[in-house]
DNA sequence: TTCGCTTGCACAATCGATGGTGCAGAAACT
DNA sequence: AGTTTCTGCACCATCGATTGTGCAAGCGAA
């Protein structure tokens, strides 16, 4: 409180105080002073003054001058989901370790919103943009391209920029197989007892659905065509899909392949208010991992996408000189029921 | 692709193209042109050119000049948790509806990191900062105060700025009561069968622990002093607390009060690999709501903090002229086991 | 015709930091 | 002593937008 809301010190203030020119002060403060042959002692003086007056660089001014900001963007579909929030957490760690500032925003899976969001970020001269699960990656690409902004797709691929995605086909294959194998030989699963719920017409869903069909056919010999109930990425629409199914068949299938943890919440909504016993025989496979989801009262086999590897790969690619767009697959992992895995939070320190 | 990575158009470009001065262009583009008595037709011309050349304002330049940025910050402890991610989701909605840009960052519950993060955000001239669950809110306050930045505490109160927090005492009281009542009269809970796990020496934990003690005493007549096992906000430390307890007693308590969903993950880790039957008699109360957590194989009563109300209140307060710091309590809600509630995602539209 | 008011806009300073260029004085060399 | 080479730093344009101020042309009134 020694100073009333005093304006922040600038290099001009330090320039007057130190008797050096603003450019010298600037060079000292941003670390380029050796290149500029500033005397060690001058530098020390200025650094001392900066400390004393609590100087901090105005990053908007720097950003304007350099036409980049030190901000790195992550565009998510939504925050409120363990897959995407672990993405945010992991991303933050990477960005910070590079001395930059993470900016995480969501765009609600709305192509229009996605483009607007990218444009806003570009207006702040962000240095790089990581586009996660975009509904229209190529639309976002156009916007970035025009601004000369480095960007990369994650989770859902685009045709015009590098993409790092989970190996959805293999993940879904493993998951389908695991669901089927979960039933022993005494009472094996029949093809018409395994249904897939959730998903849209996006690349990930298509791959997963394809693997689902193929694996059912391979392991169960057949695959009735109505085995898939697309219901977007919304708990409520998924809920309605379950209700409709229940209406038609008088029961749920014995086994479910659920396309994402968001759709899985649709199942929770269906469960709410219905007797627990109704689900005692159920076996569920869920594409996406949620620690709590793994411990539901029936077996839930999950697929965990390797977020750490995806982000790491994405950072590698975004720094490289641009080449023709490629898609990189990252192997996901099959998670047995009742597994509580470590996550990005585990790298944080904590005081007991 | 009609233009190679052409630099973005500026008001100077449009100035040349339109024959008007940069200041006129600026006024037209930022909407202040009527105040400046610019002719309608001039405005239209400029707006047309802007459209044609895909002009977008350089927000760093604007920010520099105006010394604010249009950015609104949300500082979270961590992302990867349903409570905080729903906070982020809700916050985003509010910020966007005000035409500003949300910036969500996490500071790992580290006081040093919290201050650094605030300083970084300030360097970008953010307009407001919402500080969620900070370990050292008053430290962050100092930083904000010096910069004249409006800020507010959420979830954990500070002494030097307004705070909007959940009514932790009442929430914990309801929760403790609900846990106790969950046991019928045939086999009622004894005082030494209900333990609290998790929490730190922060305001929320203290309130919850106080309510826990008081309610136990009121309803069960006694409260042995060792009923609380603080274990920070870390799944692993909580896991170790459960293991230690199990070591000592050869079993878990019949009932648990778990201080947060993050601590609850410690319980999951304890469950992993142990037989499900070990937990069949368990009753858990968890402060924080997680939809999946609500459907675990034993009764889990949860407390949902009213994130929407908290954020709404915080936005109201942050706009008001400053007064002496006050703390506002927002009532949380008791959630019965097997409840799948709507969340911030439900307001998004989705295509099936 | 002249005064005064309105209309419609241009000018120029400013926000804070950066970095290319230039230049004086000291040191080194012939 | 004269010339070249370093040292060490100052100068100044620049990034793009904002905003207080000034002023000419147009118009109506006296």
Image (cartoon, coloured by chain):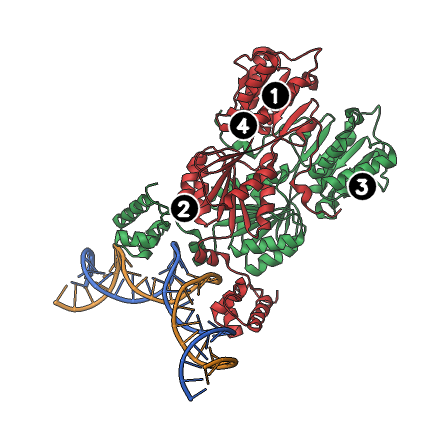
Chain colours: A green, B red, C blue, D orange
Q: Indicate the secondary structure of the residue bearing disc 4.
A: loop
Q: Chain of mark 1?
A: B
- Residue receiving disc 3: A228
Point 77% across, 25% down: residue: A276
Q: Secondary structure at mark 1?
A: helix
Across and down, in percent, residue B63 comes to 47, 55
Residue marked by disc 1: B176
What kind of element bears circle 2?
Answer: helix
- Please report contact status of discs 3 and 2: CB closer than 8 Å, yes or no: no
* Nearest-to-viewer mark from 3 and 1: 1
Mark 4 and mark 1 in contact (Cβ < 8 Å)?
no
Does mark 2 fall on the same chain as mark 1? yes
Q: In the displayed structure, would residue B99 be above or below residue A286?
A: below
**Relative to the observer, which residue lies in front, B89 or A302?**
B89
Mark 2 or mark 4: which comes first in sequence?
Answer: 2
Q: For marks 3 and 2, give the one nearer the viewer.
A: 2
Tell me the residue at 60%/58% (across/down). Answer: A143
Q: Which residue is mark 2?
A: B147
Q: Do tags 2 and 4 sit on the same chain?
A: yes
Q: CA distance from mark 2 to mark 4?
A: 33 Å
Q: Residues within 10 Å of mark 3 (few under 14, many from 20)?
A: some
Q: For mark 2, name the chain.
A: B
Establish whether labels 1 and 4 are both on one chain. Answer: yes
How far apart in space, not on screen, are marks 1 and 2 (Cα)?
43 Å
Q: Which residue is located at x 55 percent, y 22 percent?
A: B211
Camera sees residue A307:
no
Percent position of residue A232, x then y: 74, 44
Callout 3: chain: A
Q: In the depicted view, which residue is nearer to us: B103 or A160? A: B103
Q: What residue did someone put label 4 on?
A: B234
What residue is rendered at 54% in x and 18% in y? B228
């Amino acid at each position: 409180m020694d100073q009333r809301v005093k304006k922040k010190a600038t290099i001009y203030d330090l320039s007057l105080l130190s008797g050096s020119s603003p450019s010298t002060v600037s060079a000292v403060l941003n670390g380029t002073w050796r290149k500029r042959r500033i005397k060690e002692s001058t530098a020390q003086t200025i650094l001392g003054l900066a400390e004393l007056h609590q100087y901090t660089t105005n990053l908007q001014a720097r950003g304007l001058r350099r036409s980049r900001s030190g901000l790195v963007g992550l565009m998510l579909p939504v925050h409120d989901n363990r897959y995407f929030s672990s993405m945010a957490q992991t991303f933050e760690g990477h960005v910070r370790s590079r001395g930059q500032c993470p900016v995480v925003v969501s765009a609600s899976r709305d192509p229009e919103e996605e483009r607007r969001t990218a444009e806003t970020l570009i207006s702040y001269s962000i240095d790089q943009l990581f586009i996660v699960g975009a509904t229209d990656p190529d639309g976002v690409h156009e916007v970035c391209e025009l601004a000369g902004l480095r960007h990369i797709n994650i989770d859902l691929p685009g045709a015009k920029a590098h993409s790092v995605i989970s190996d959805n086909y293999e993940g879904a294959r493993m998951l389908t197989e695991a669901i089927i194998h979960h039933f022993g030989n005494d009472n094996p699963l029949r093809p018409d007892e395994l249904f897939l719920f959730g998903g849209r017409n996006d690349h990930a869903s298509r791959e997963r659905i394809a693997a689902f069909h193929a694996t059912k056919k391979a392991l169960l010999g057949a695959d009735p065509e109505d085995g898939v109930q697309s219901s977007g990425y919304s708990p409520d629409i998924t809920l309605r899909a379950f209700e409709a199914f229940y209406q038609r068949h008088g029961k749920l299938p014995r086994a479910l392949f659920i396309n994402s943890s968001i759709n899985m919440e649709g199942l929770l909504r269906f469960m709410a208010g219905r007797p627990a016993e109704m689900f005692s025989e159920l076996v569920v496979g869920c594409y996406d991992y949620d620690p709590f989801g793994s411990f539901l009262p029936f077996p839930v086999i999950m697929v965990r996408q390797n977020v750490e590897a995806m982000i790491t790969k994405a950072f590698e690619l975004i720094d490289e000189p641009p080449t023709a767009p490629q898609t990189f697959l990252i192997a996901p992992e099959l998670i047995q029921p009742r597994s509580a895995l470590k996550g990005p939070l585990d790298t944080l320190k904590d005081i007991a």
